[in-house]
Amino acid sequence: MRKRALLLGLAMTGALAAACTPTVRVKVDPINIYAKLDADVRVRLDKEVQSLIQQNPNLF
């Protein structure tokens, strides 16, 4: 009878301990990276336009 009461007590203690486990939730916000690429794109386009005009002078 003592073994049975001991086992029942251990089972109840284990069930109570399992019911009290904490949950940790972390909210992670996305990282926004803003880059200004305007100057580089303009330089490339200007070079391409200049080379196209030089290759085709009657274009305009």
Image: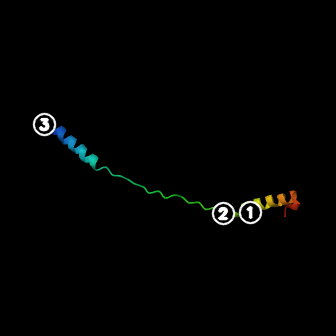
Q: Nearer the viewer, residue 55 or 25?
A: 55
Residue 42: give its label: 1
Find the distance from the CA under tag 2 to the CA under tag 3.
77 Å
Q: Which SS class for mark 1?
A: helix
Q: Is residue 24 left or right of residue 60?
A: left
Find the distance from the CA under tag 1 to the CA under tag 3.
87 Å
State the colouring used for the structure image: rainbow
Query: Of circles 2 and 3, which is in front?
Result: 2
In the rendered image, residue 44, in percent from the top left (x then y), is placed at: 76, 59
In the rendered image, residue 55, in percent from the top left (x then y), is placed at: 87, 56
Query: Of circles 2 and 1, which is in front?
Result: 1
In the rendered image, residue 35, in percent from the top left (x then y), is placed at: 64, 61
Which amino acid lies under the numbered mark 1 shown in the image of this protein? Arg
Which amino acid lies under the numbered mark 3 shown in the image of this protein? Arg
Q: CB under 8 Å between callouts 2 and 3? A: no
Query: Would you name the residue on which mark 3 appears?
Result: 2
Give the mark nearest the N terminus, 2 or 1: 2
Residue 36: give its label: 2
Residue plotted at (31% across, 49% down): 21
Residue plotted at (72% across, 64% down): 39
Q: Is residue 22 above or below residue 53?
A: above
Residue plotted at (40% across, 54% down): 25
Q: Name the quadrant of the N terminus.
A: top left
Residue plotted at (80% across, 60% down): 49
Q: Residues within 10 Å of mark 1 (few under 14, many from 20)?
A: few
Find residue 4 and report its image quarter: top left
The residue at the far left in this view is 1
Find residue 27 and report its image quarter: bottom left
Which amino acid lies under the numbered mark 2 shown in the image of this protein? Lys
